[in-house]
Image (spheres, helix red, strand yellow):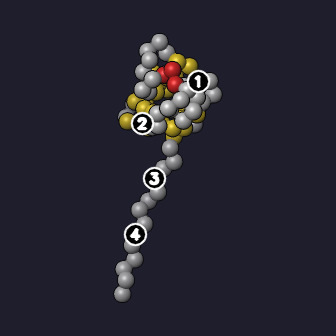
Amino acid sequence: MATKRKRSPKPPPPQMAHWRKNHRNPRLVLAELDNGELVNVKVHDNTLYCDGMMFPVTSDGANYYERNRPRQRGRL
């Protein structure tokens, strides 16, 4: 008889952030999370982010990081 395989649980959907403003520090972006919380997100280059841009973030304890890096300004 064949044994049934257990399904692995689905990963949670990525947490999305909405760009608010760039800091003078080129590695930080102020973003609003889905739940309305304003956080600083560590990014590769903040000049790639623009007004109204939505992007996925991941958290590591108290810090937030970009999940995907934009190749072109304003596009993920």
- Residue 44 coordinates in the image, percent (x, y): 42, 26
- Residue at left 63%, top 28%? 52
Amino acid, disc 2: Ser
Sooner in the amino-acid sequence: mark 1 or mark 2: 1
- Residue at left 42%, top 21%? 27
Sooner in the amino-acid sequence: mark 2 or mark 3: 3
Q: Nearer the viewer, mark 1 or mark 2?
A: 1
Q: Label 1 to label 4, Cα distance in Å?
A: 43 Å
Asked where in the image residue 16 lies, by quadrant, the reply is: top right
Amino acid, disc 4: Lys
Determine if residue 39 is in view: yes
- Secondary-structure class at tag 4: loop
Q: Which mark is residue 6?
A: 4
- Secondary-structure class at tag 3: loop
Q: Are marks 2 and 3 in contact (CB under 8 Å)?
A: no
- Secondary-structure class at tag 1: loop
Q: Nearer the viewer, mark 3 or mark 1?
A: 1
Q: Which mark is residue 11?
A: 3
Q: Nearer the viewer, residue 26 or 14?
A: 26
Q: Residues within 10 Å of mark 4 (few under 14, many from 20)?
A: few
Q: Which residue is mark 2?
A: 59
- Residue 42 coordinates in the image, percent (x, y): 42, 26
Q: Label 4 to label 2, Cα distance in Å?
A: 28 Å
Q: Which residue is mark 1?
A: 50
